[in-house]
Image (spheres, grey):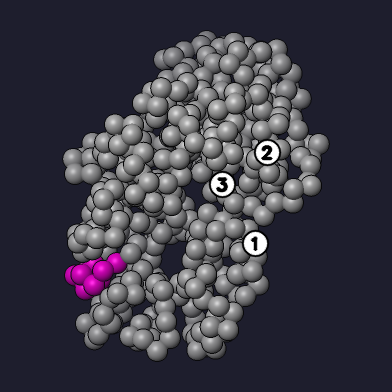
Amino acid sequence: MPVEAIVSPVVSADSSLYSSTRFVGRQPILDLQQAVHGYELLFRTSLENSFSGDSDNATRQMIDNVLLLGMDTIAPGSRAFVNCTREAITEELITFLPPEVTVVEVLETVEVDEELVGACVKLKKMGYQIALDDYVPGGGSDRLIELANYVKLDYRACGPEQLRQIQRYLEGAEVALVAEKVETAEEFERARDAGYLYFQGYFFARPTILHSREIPPNLVIYMQLLSAISRPQMDLREIERLVMAETSLCYRVLRVVNSVAVGLRYEVTSVRQALLLLGEDPLRRLLSIATATSLWKRYNVSSELILLALQRARFCELLAPLCGQPGGEQYLIGLISVVDAILQVPMEQVLKMLPLRGEAAGVLLGQDGPAGASLKLIQAYERQDWRSCGLICRRLHLSEAELMRMYVVALQWATKEIRDAGL
């Protein structure tokens, strides 16, 4: 079996998922240590109905999607917060999902009456946890406080005084406060200090940056390696020198190559041998993954951030042919889009060390251009900005079904790489 076929597997999602296109998005919920506690699962039936449609049908199809894709892909090793309508709760549709990892998120629009309370009591006895979305004291959801494990509040809409009032109101209740819409590291710190225990949003991908900060010397080798694999023509001798200079990188390269080179009768024992065995694109992917996972191990980077980087990289690579762009460069654009958050330095400073062509570098600074279509699309998908997704898809002549397929394939691939790396 060719090495490339294993190093860069194309994971096929169940084709039945796309017979009627359904969009699954997810947003991480992190704890005080910025470790992933769970994911809120988000659903749309198309790019056109972000604020309309049958919500009961949306919940039914969301449950179906999770069953098709598998909880290990959608919310690996964590909890799944599933938006539930009244029907999903009272008719026990949610019970198709495993209780030990499923959180029933009661939407603020759900009417709370005796029937709903009784259904929630039954779900709690079955092992499900309960979350109250956009909680407001004095409303109908007060009847569910004794059953709730989580209370979710809009961080940006809930001022300090209002938060203190809510905390006093909930005093004695065994619930954890979840801050929603936390989008920067600075907001995370303020929410943590205010008493929230969990935090929802991609705040770790938008770091608070001190512009005078330099890239630490012990991180330079990783930037040099990213620089080396960014060049159109890679210098294998330079790459060998960089890999050999970092023990953890050397170990990972040899371990991966030996695990995939099943057709060989001997063990690969040198980095040069390993590099020659791989083609350029598999080598770029392998070294970028090894670099990302080594950074996580050494510098305590959030594993969710590494997953985000790898998923973006793979998605951009998959979309490259439709954009008329080089696949290797698109992969690196997706990966590097998160490097500023990993290193906690401005993107301008990161790009000074990378030999990307002008247009590709401009994309990472937020400029428009053909090279940036794939990155803008995956970022819009992450934000659940379906209007922007639709505009980009129409420009690329990309169907909704194909967009969903690429998102799922990229997620499955990145999840597998994270799992294989032991993160």
> Where is residue 239 drawn, in percent x and y?
68, 18
The quadrant the N terminus occupies is: top left
Three-letter code for the amino acid on which mark 3 is drawn: Leu
Q: Residue at x 39, y 72 (%)?
A: 133
Task: Please tell me the numbered disc located at residue 348.
Answer: 2
User: Is residue 171 at all visible to an observer of this figure?
Assistant: no
Q: CA distance from mark 2 to mark 1?
A: 20 Å
Residue depicted at x 63% and y 33%: 291
Badge number at residue 186: 1
Task: Give me the disc on residue 305.
Answer: 3
Q: Residue most toward the front?
A: 368
**Residue type, label 2:** Glu
Span of residues in magenta: 84-91
| Amino acid of disc 1 | Glu
In-front residue for pair 344/366: 366
Q: Earlier in the sequence, mark 2 or mark 1?
A: 1
